[in-house]
Amino acid sequence: MKILVVATWYPHEERPAEAPFNAEHVEAIRGQGHEVRVVHVRLGTALALPADANGIWEGVPVRRVAADPKRPQTVLACQRLLAREMGWADVVHTMAFSSILLVLPAWSARSVAGRGRPWVHTEHWNGVVNPASVSPLWQKLSGLRSVLRFPHVVTGVTRQLAAEMQRFARPDAARVIPCVVKGRGPVLPSTFAKPLKLVAVGGLIPRKRPLSTIQTIAWLRDQGVPAHLTWVGDGPQRTECEGLVAEMGLQDSVTLAGSVRPVEVADHLSAADLFFLPTEQENFFTSAAEALAAGRAVVATRVGGFSDYADDSNSRLVDDPRPEVLGAAILDAVEAFKDVPAESIATPIRERFSPETVGALFDTAYLAAVARA
């Protein structure tokens, strides 16, 4: 089939790490033999489009277009482009909630004229499941989720997300299609030596609870358990984290590694014994899945759809984010997984979330959309 992907978040030269899950889904779709074009709509962005905005990104033709509501002419130009591209496609596939709002006018106009296309939508965004976790404004506007009734099939990356989408979608339209999780390189064994090596991957932002994470390292130290945390990622709480590390005397026990390339993230995961991140809210929780794909058990809070794959066989999830509870979960995980081969943790995740497995699920979604259109 010819698949037109429309996404408001997609990797580009200025931000090559933007929304890698969308690009990985495109790779999985192409792996099934489909011809894919991407329209990346840079919605309301202040960044100017580069002169070579249209081109190839990782083997996929990508057209980039601005759509700034403050400049109505850009929105109209975007609609004209989308209408033309839909004429080429067998299936329209939106990725990210805001993409629905952009595609809807052109898709509706074509449908009224009898030239509509089957429509699949894929969602990763936490704001669909838990609007309050995004902002008070989005919580007030969250009734906009009713636009999920327009696509013929909607897919969420977790069961929790798909169930919430089904509340707004066409009857029986929602299904689960997870993120792609690639195992980067061989699975290396953990050592569980002293100090215990923990790794977290995420932004230094309140939602990821970096301060609680640091306080847990202090709790472990006070229990006589030497541990070292490497936090991979950066953000506005960095200075506050550095201050807490100094205040608690953890300069030798906590490393704030900053933002690194994906291959370096994989190296940090492989160097650790456990993945530890007591986040406030997640959907798929890609960094946890990548840790499992590296053979590293996960310790986290039970706050999202990632319990689809994180269970007692590979993780310890807790409901209470206090340092003493988190610390006890880490100690429990050490006892549970220190003698478990890393391959036993990694292999089921690598198979379940491989590009081939995810691509086959998209095949079924496309066939369902065509049948419903």
Image (cartoon, rainbow, N blue to C red):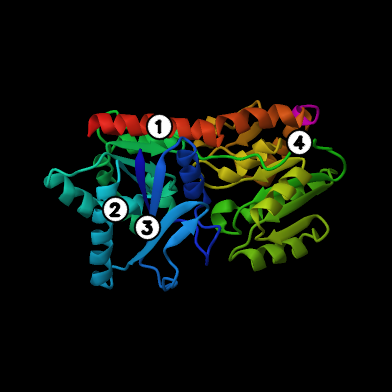
* Disc 3 to disc 4: CB gap under 8 Å: no
Q: Check the picture and name the quadrant holding the C terminus.
A: top left
Q: Which mark is residue 279?
A: none
Residue located 41% across and 73% down the image: 46
Look at the picture and state if 155 lies above or below 99: above
- Structural crowding at the residue carrying mark 2, measured as other residues with C-alpha within 10 Å and reported as few (<14), some (14–19) or many (≥20): some
- Structural crowding at the residue carrying mark 3, measured as other residues with C-alpha within 10 Å and reported as few (<14), some (14–19) or many (≥20): few
Residue located 21% across and 54% down the image: 105
Quadrant of res 206: bottom right
The residue to which callout 2 is attached is 85
The residue to which callout 1 is attached is 363
Quadrant of res 286: top right
Pointer 1 or 4: first along the chain: 4
Q: CA distance from mark 1 to mark 3?
A: 37 Å
Q: Is residue 214 visible?
A: no
**Secondary structure, magenta segment, majority class:** loop
Range covered by the magenta-colored residues: 336-340
Quadrant of res 301: top right
- Position of 232 with respect to 57 (left or right) is right
- Structural crowding at the residue carrying mark 4, measured as other residues with C-alpha within 10 Å and reported as few (<14), some (14–19) or many (≥20): some
Pointer 3 or 4: first along the chain: 3
Under mark 3, the amino acid is Pro
Does dot 2 land on a helix, a strand or a loop? helix
Of residues 71 and 304, the one drawn nearer to the viewer in this rendering: 71
Asked if residue 280 is among those painted magenta in the image, a careful observer would answer: no
Q: Check the picture and name the quadrant holding the N terminus.
A: top left
Pointer 4 or 2: first along the chain: 2
Pointer 2 or 1: first along the chain: 2
Q: Which mark is residue 136?
A: 3
Q: Which mark is residue 331?
A: 4
